[in-house]
Image (cartoon, helix red, strand yellow):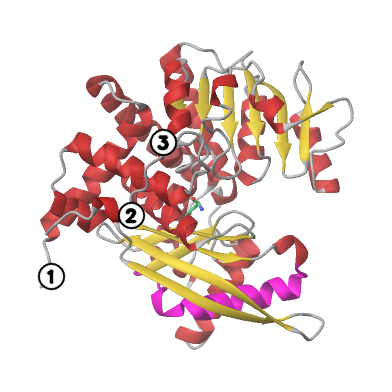
Amino acid sequence: MNYPLSAETLTLTAHAPQDAYSVALKNFDIAAESLNLSPDMRSQIMYPERVLTVNVPVRMDSGKIVRFEGYRVQHNTSRGPAKGGIRFHPDVSLNEVKALAMWMTWKTAIVNVPFGGGKGGVICNPKELSQTELERLARRYTAGILPLLGPARDIPAPDVYTNPQIMAWMMDTYSMMKADGYPVPGVVTGKPLATGGSVGRNEATGRGVFHCIESACEHLHVPVKGSKTVVQGFGNAGSVVASLLDSHQSLVIAVNDSRGGVYRPDGLDIPKLMMHKERTGSVVGFPGADPIAQEEMLALECDILIPAALENAITGENAHRVRTRIVAEAANGPVTPEADGILAANGVFLIPDVLCNAGGVTVSYFEWCQNEQHFYWDIHEVENRLERVMQRSFAEVLGIHTDRKVSMRLAANILGISRVAESTAVRGLFP
Ligand code: GLU
């Protein structure tokens, strides 16, 4: 079979706006080259296995019906059921969901949990919807993607602008439609504890980022205590990693969210900032801190910079202004390939997304195991197991980085892609 590389691989031109899918394909190509993967194997594992677009009509509180568009992509299921979050955001696109699904495939393989990769999304702005509208949207979307779902097939989880409540509605809709109302908790993860969620799942992504940062600091001989941290994005992952670093005496000097940023050179009081965000919905206006624009914040001198929001935060345009020792990608795809090159040339140590934020899906795996075995663990068991998985995965990626003298991103992709290629090869082709 011919390897149709040029069909979907875009040439990256300097400062071109980056489509996440072209970035994902580009990084796949680099790793596949380095692994010497055959064209046959490349074409088997690079494209999504299933792509579903659904119409999501929702009756608004006003009585009017609004049509939303949703997607679910299963990128690869050779190692286990498709696994990955659901994003509700105005910027969702099919290409973005395809990229995020592909990254989930490598991510689950890097932390070596028995899942494949998937992702879903709906183009909408949940901040403009009432709770009842959001519930109807979540349920109708779930009904739309129902043919793909199941605890042994495809298991969604939270992602940008989705949360445990939305997972509970998804689980309920699936249970009502597929199991006569009897609960099927293992069909989604990131659920509330009351419906079979796991302790520690909410904090898992941020905690996993923290373990990666600890390992990177040890490797680079940068003490966490007294280090300076900047966090771009103060959502679930960003706020948890900020508070863990703060409790380990790193000075978190600047953070922002979609409405703006705050800066305090002596370190922000993170517990108080979290309460301020809880109360007002944003970090903006936090007493005792100065306002700061995102571009200025990304250029602050620090030891640890954590992009924890969306794709394309650090690009060919601004990467040369970044002044940090470590970039920890809590978000998916925040650094473009062009920026990767600039950061590497400037000696920045990058912890790539597929490793750095894999704590979330790791505890999703623990949640699914607990659901399947009907036996629940305590917080120590979850946190200890998560720490072991993150430390082992970091060490494996670092080993490839040092042995093969490749970037950390390439090392992570080599590990993930080689595991997927191996399972694909041993399973063989049907028929
Ligand atoms: N949305 C998260 C991610 O991008 C979690 C996925 C999951 O737990 O399945 O990794």
The residue that mark 1 highlights is: 430
In the displayed structure, would residue 219 be above or below residue 144? above
136 falls in the magenta region: yes
- Residue type at mark 2? Glu
Q: Residues within 10 Å of mark 3 (few under 14, many from 20)?
A: many
Q: Nearer the viewer, mark 2 or mark 3?
A: 2
Which quadrant of the structure image shows residue 159?
bottom right
For residue 390, the mark is 3
- Residue type at mark 3? Met
Q: Nearer the viewer, mark 1 or mark 2?
A: 2
239 and 259: which is toward the camera: 259
Q: Position of residue 202 (x, y in %)?
A: 59, 50
Q: Position of residue 343 (x, y in %)?
A: 47, 22
- State the CA–CA distance, disc 1 to disc 2: 25 Å
Q: Nearer the viewer, mark 3 or mark 1?
A: 1
Mark 1 CB lies closer than 8 A to ligand 1: no
148 horizontally vs 305: left or right: left
Residue drawn 66% across the image and 45% down it? 235
For residue 8, the mark is 2
Residue drawn 75% across the image and 70% down it? 131
156 and 16: which is toward the camera: 16
Q: Position of residue 291 (x, y in %)?
A: 82, 29
Q: Position of residue 392 (x, y in %)?
A: 34, 33
- First of labels 1, 2 by sequence position: 2
- First of labels 2, 3 by sequence position: 2
Which residues make up the magenta segment? 129-153
- State the CA–CA distance, disc 2 to disc 3: 33 Å
Q: Secondary structure at mark 1?
A: loop
Which quadrant of the structure image shows residue 240?
top right
